[in-house]
Image (tube, helix red, strand yellow):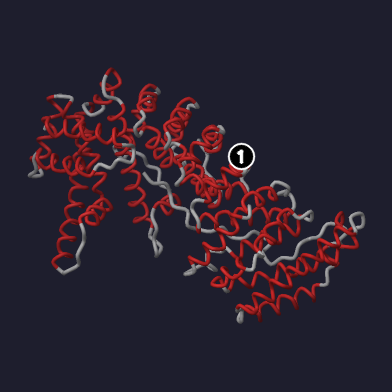
């Protein structure tokens, strides 16, 4: 299972990275409106001229000038501890030097030289500067140096810089500095936003940072507090996205957040939308981020248990019944919760979830959300509403197929099993008809893709077996395999009426049980061991049972 990939970067909020700091009167500074703007304009102009000619010589000059101003500031602060006005000028000079260093973002190939100059520790340590504005200057500098556009095609220099930053405790100092900032102040809110962007950039360059920042800091706890805020706001939106990024590929982080009552916190966040829709595209994105976080949380077994205990199954069913914006996301969350976890499947049946699930299975859910679809499908050109509707419907269909397959895998006997099977008998086997409709449609798509791949090989384009199999999976093979598995469960029930209906529908399409067995055999042979060797062996034994029974 995959959760949505987070590739998009945040837009900067009002106070941009080049905005001068608003020095506080308490630090002995003049108000912002007393700053000579002409000096700042000249600095900006001179910076633009330098950007075009950044070389090793320029780097050394910038580094020396920065280190000199830093020493001056340290000396002035030590000398005039009780008189801030005396070290105010040195602080402004230090700010100016940090602004000048931003031009290095235009020459990322020089990052190894920057690291070699031993200036990174000096820069990073300024995150704990007594003047929060200087620390925030550093945050803005780091945001520029690690920006995705700046690092394009410079992977190795980027790794060198990020390694040096992490070695010098940048993660701890970034979070420590963020904790002293207030969202009520526009400049500080911009610095919080920039801090989260820096962390996102660091993870992009060095994925291991995702676990490091959660191990070494209290960032996870800070993010959880932000997503629990009832009113929608920009920081809440970005916090939800950072959470999803930190959890997406890290079992350790998923477990860590679960231990911090993260499941309850995320359920609390999505529950706000059980009977209402988000009001803006940004709020829609935040809600999808929260569901991404929830799906990541539902990967470890212990978090599935927390989800069931927190009545997450009931909440998702309520959301489905309301058919609001979160309808498809609720199905996705249930799919994650019930995969390889029978207690969630049992709870789903006990709280009357079958009726809701099979309404979706039959395609009776009328809800359509084009914004959600755009998160699930990447399109280079805009799609018209009809195509968006079809693709959203297809995504939803695949999720529901997976959910039904999970129910069959999790409920193997007893009255719950009987209730599940009875859904395929009621209304003159209409759900068997629907299942076979899906089987034929996905079978045709996979067959067409296989023929296309064969033609490519005839045209001398070589594809190995793994690549061919992956291409078929993309064309719908996985959903076809799950439909075949559901057919296997139904066949093994030995219900004569359902068996006869399946054989009749296969015969009408000039197919037989052997065609279904071939799909099951391919699934058996390619079953992965993500859940462990023991689970793989159990799964293969179950599929072999279906093949034998048919």
Q: Front-most of 386 and 28?
A: 28
Left or right of 360 on screen, residue 319: right
Residue visible at 63% across and 55% down?
Answer: 168
The residue lying furthest to the top in this view is 415
Q: Position of residue 328 (x, y in %)?
A: 41, 42
Q: Position of residue 468 (x, y in %)?
A: 22, 56
Q: Position of residue 299 (x, y in %)?
A: 42, 37
Q: Front-most of 38 and 158?
A: 158
Q: Is residue 412 above or below residue 448?
A: above
Q: Position of residue 324 (x, y in %)?
A: 46, 40
Q: Front-most of 76 and 453?
A: 76
Residue visible at 53% across and 37% down?
Answer: 257
Tell me the SS state at disc 1: helix
Location of mark 1 (residue)? 221
Residue visible at 55% across and 32% down?
Answer: 261
Q: Is residue 222 visible?
A: yes
Left or right of 449 on screen, residue 381: right
């Amino acid at each position: 299972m995959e959760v949505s990939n987070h590739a998009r970067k945040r837009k900067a909020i009002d106070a941009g990275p080049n905005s001068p700091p608003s020095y506080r009167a308490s630090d002995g500074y003049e108000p912002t409106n007393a700053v000579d703007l002409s000096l700042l304009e000249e600095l900006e102009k001179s910076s633009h001229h330098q950007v075009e000619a950044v070389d090793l010589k320029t780097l050394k000059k910038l580094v020396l000038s920065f280190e000199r101003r830093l020493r001056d500031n340290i000396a002035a602060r030590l000398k005039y501890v009780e008189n801030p006005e005396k070290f105010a000028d040195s602080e402004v000079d230090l700010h100016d030097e940090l602004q000048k260093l931003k031009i290095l973002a235009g020459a990322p190939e020089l990052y190894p030289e920057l690291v070699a100059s031993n200036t990174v520790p000096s820069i990073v340590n300024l995150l704990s500067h007594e003047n929060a504005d200087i620390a925030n200057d550093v945050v803005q500098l780091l945001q520029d140096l690690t920006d995705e556009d700046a690092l394009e095609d410079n992977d190795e220099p980027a790794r060198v810089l990020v390694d040096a930053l992490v070695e010098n405790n940048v993660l701890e100092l970034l979070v420590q500095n963020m904790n002293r900032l207030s969202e009520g102040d526009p400049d500080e809110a911009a610095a919080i936003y920039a801090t989260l962007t820096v962390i996102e950039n660091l993870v992009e360059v060095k994925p291991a940072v995702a676990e490091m920042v959660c191990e070494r800091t209290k960032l996870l706890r800070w993010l959880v507090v932000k997503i629990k805020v009832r009113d929608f706001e920009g920081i809440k939106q970005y916090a939800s996205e950072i959470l999803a990024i930190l959890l997406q590929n890290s079992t350790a982080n998923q477990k860590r957040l679960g231990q911090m009552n993260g499941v309850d916190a995320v359920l609390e966040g999505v529950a706000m939308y059980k009977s209402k829709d988000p009001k803006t595209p940004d709020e829609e994105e935040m809600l999808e981020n929260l569901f991404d976080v929830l799906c990541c949380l539902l990967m470890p077994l212990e978090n599935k248990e927390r989800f069931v205990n927190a009545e997450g199954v009931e909440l998702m069913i309520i959301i489905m019944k309301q058919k609001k914006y979160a309808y498809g996301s609720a199905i996705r969350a249930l799919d994650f919760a019930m995969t390889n976890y029978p207690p969630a499947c049992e709870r789903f049946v006990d709280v009357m979830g079958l009726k809701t699930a099979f309404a979706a299975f039959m395609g009776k859910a009328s809800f359509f959300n084009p914004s959600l679809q755009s998160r699930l499908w990447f399109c280079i050109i805009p799609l018209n509403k009809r195509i968006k509707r079809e693709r959203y419907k297809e995504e939803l269909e695949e999720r529901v197929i997976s959910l039904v397959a999970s129910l069959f895998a999790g409920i193997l006997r007893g009255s719950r099993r009987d209730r599940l099977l009875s859904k395929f008998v009621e209304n003159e086997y209409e759900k068997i008809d629907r299942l076979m409709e899906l089987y034929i449609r996905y079978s045709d798509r996979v067959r067409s893709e296989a023929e296309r791949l064969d033609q490519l090989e005839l045209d001398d384009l070589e594809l190995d077996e793994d690549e061919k199999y992956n291409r078929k999976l993309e064309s719908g093979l996985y959903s076809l395999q799950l439909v075949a598995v559901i057919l296997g469960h139904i066949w093994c029930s030995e219900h004569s009426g359902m068996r006869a209906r399946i054989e009749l529908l296969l015969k009408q399409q000039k197919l037989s049980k052997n065609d279904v067995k071939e799909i099951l055999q391919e699934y058996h042979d390619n079953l992965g061991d993500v859940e462990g060797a023991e689970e793989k062996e159990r799964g293969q034994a179950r599929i072999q049972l279906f093949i034998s029974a048919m």
